[in-house]
Image (tube, rainbow, N blue to C red):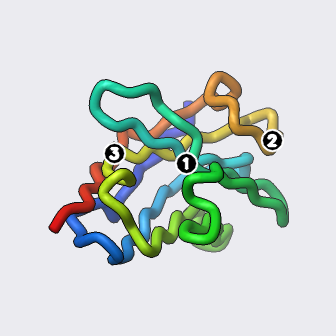
Amino acid sequence: QEQLVESGGGLVQPGGSLRLSCTVLGRYAMGWFRQAPGKERDFVAAIWGGSTIYADSVKGRFAISRDNTKNTVYLQMNSLKPEDTAVYYCAANTLNSLTTRKALYDYWGQGTQVTVSS
């Protein structure tokens, strides 16, 4: 059983930045998702090998990366907007496919709250 642990959430003003981290022991395709109150959990970004994909709503503002020496995946979030407010989850896809489909992710972290507000 893989354990994923997110960190780095918090309160930030509109236009600000945050970097989320997710520690994972295995080498899997990794994704970030987010869930706002009363809404579905939505895809944000994913990484596998040298490839990345992003939701249209975050392209150009968010960047996913990983440091295998630290067993950590990052989500750098810039130019944050109030609509980015959500609980952010990292997830591991053991099939190692680059996908937006949350049903294909096997392991999930506990989530970290990001609030964008003045």
> Marks 3 and 2, Cα distance to the nearest angstrom?
26 Å
Quarter where residue 93 is shown: top right
- Marks 1 and 3: which is nearer the front? 3
Q: Amino acid at mark 2?
A: Asn
Pick whichever, 6 or 11, lies toward us.
11
Q: Secondary structure at mark 3?
A: strand
Q: Amino acid at mark 3?
A: Ala
Task: Residue under label 2, please give it.
Answer: 96
Quarter where residue 2 is shown: top right
Residue lying at 38% horizontally and 75% vertically, measured from the top left: 17
Q: Is residue 66 left or right of residue 108?
A: right
Q: Secondary structure at mark 2?
A: loop
Q: Amino acid at mark 1?
A: Trp
Task: Residue under label 3, please give it.
Answer: 86
Residue 103, given in percent of the width and then of the height, sits at 64, 22
Residue lying at 52% horizontally and 64% vertically, measured from the top left: 75
Residue lying at 46% horizontally and 74% vertically, measured from the top left: 78
Task: Residue under label 1, please give it.
Answer: 32
Query: Of marks 1 and 3, which one's residue comes earlier in the chain?
Result: 1
